[in-house]
Amino acid sequence: MTDYMAQMLNELMGPQRNSLPGEGAAIDFDHPDVCRDFLVGFCLAEAFRNTKNDLGFCQFPIHDEALKKRYQESNRFGRLGYEEKYFERLNRLHNEVRRKIEKNEARLVHTRADTHVSSEVYDKKKQNLIEKREILGRRIEGLMEEAEIEGAQGNVAAAQTAVQKADELTKERDALQKEEENLEIERQRAIVMEEQLTAGNKQMQVCQVCGCFMLTNDAQSRIDDHLSGKLHIAYTRIKEQIDLMVKNKEEKRLQLEREKGKDRDDKTERKHDDRDRDRERDRDRKERDSRRDRSRDRDRRSSRRSRSRDGRDRRSDDRRGSDRRDRRDRSRSRDRRRH
């Protein structure tokens, strides 16, 4: 009881209710007393409080809108695993109510089918059971008479065998009697349910949100009361929250795909730019090489022409020198002949 009251006080006044002014330490959204469900969406324990599906008090007493806003605006939003765990709890509750809806619908269909079982069918089943019991009764009587005769004649083993068979048939007859009683109980239940379902020409239906039974064509005020009930609202919020989280997850996935596609396009464009620059550098290099080659060719041709001129000049000088030597030699020869 003490823990219960403390929990209620924490819910109303917060976990720092006993702190003096200025003593309360600053609390962030990752504080262990902060409700993670509330940070992501809404507290499930609070949603089902005081309903027939009450989950009890939330074990995390802090439900603060400012902390919720701070978390959703922080760079840690979606990175602490809160959303994944919350989504699991939402799905578990949603699956539970879906099973409840299916079960109640099957129950309603079965009940309606039971109410349409005719008296003729019931009477036929009952008559069949009565006939089987009567047949077994006659066989039991015959076996007991046989046991008496065998016993009177001193055939103890045969008498015991007849008694054992009679006991087995008696068990079968008792089972048929039980089946007949169950059939009658089922018939009475069907009659009562039919009276309830058809009272005032009203039919039952199953709420597709919370799984509760509702009267078809009921008064609008009662329908509004049901739709505004806390249990119905809780399951409505669960379905809406699941749809919202699935939508956000899909949008995030598409955004990541677009970013990846943009990265691939940027990489492809950079590769194209790199190839264009490489081709341009290759062209520039080839042009420079070509210019150097042409320059070397010109230099070689110029060098050959220069060497050719030098050779002609040397040959001309050699011829002139040879002519001078020849003239000197002829002059000396003439001088010797004179002397």
Image (cartoon, rainbow, N blue to C red):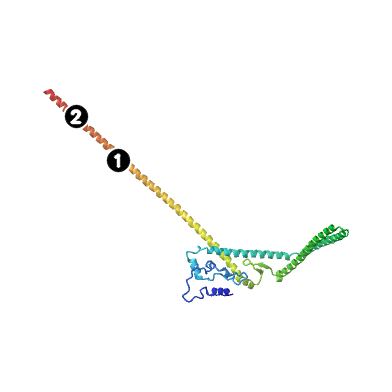
- Where does the image place residue 281, in percent across and percent down from the top left? 38, 48
* Residue 330 to residue 3: above or below: above
Q: Are marks 2 and 1 in contact (CB under 8 Å)?
A: no
Label 1's element? helix
Q: Which residue is mark 2?
A: 323
- Where does the image place residue 96, in percent across and percent down from the top left? 62, 64
The numbered mark at residue 70 is: none
Sort mark 2 into few (<14), some (14-19) or many (20+) by Cα contacts within 10 Å: few
Amino acid type of disc 1? Answer: Asp
What residue do we see at 51% from left, 70% from top?
65
Q: Is residue 51 left or right of residue 302?
A: right
> Which image quadrant: the N terminus?
bottom right
The residues tagged by marks 2 and 1 sit, at their Cα atoms, a distance apart of 36 Å
Q: Is residue 280 left or right of residue 19?
A: left
Q: Residue 137 or 318: which is nearer the viewer?
A: 137
Q: Which residue is mark 1?
A: 299
Label 2's element? helix
Confirm whether residue 243 shows in the render: no
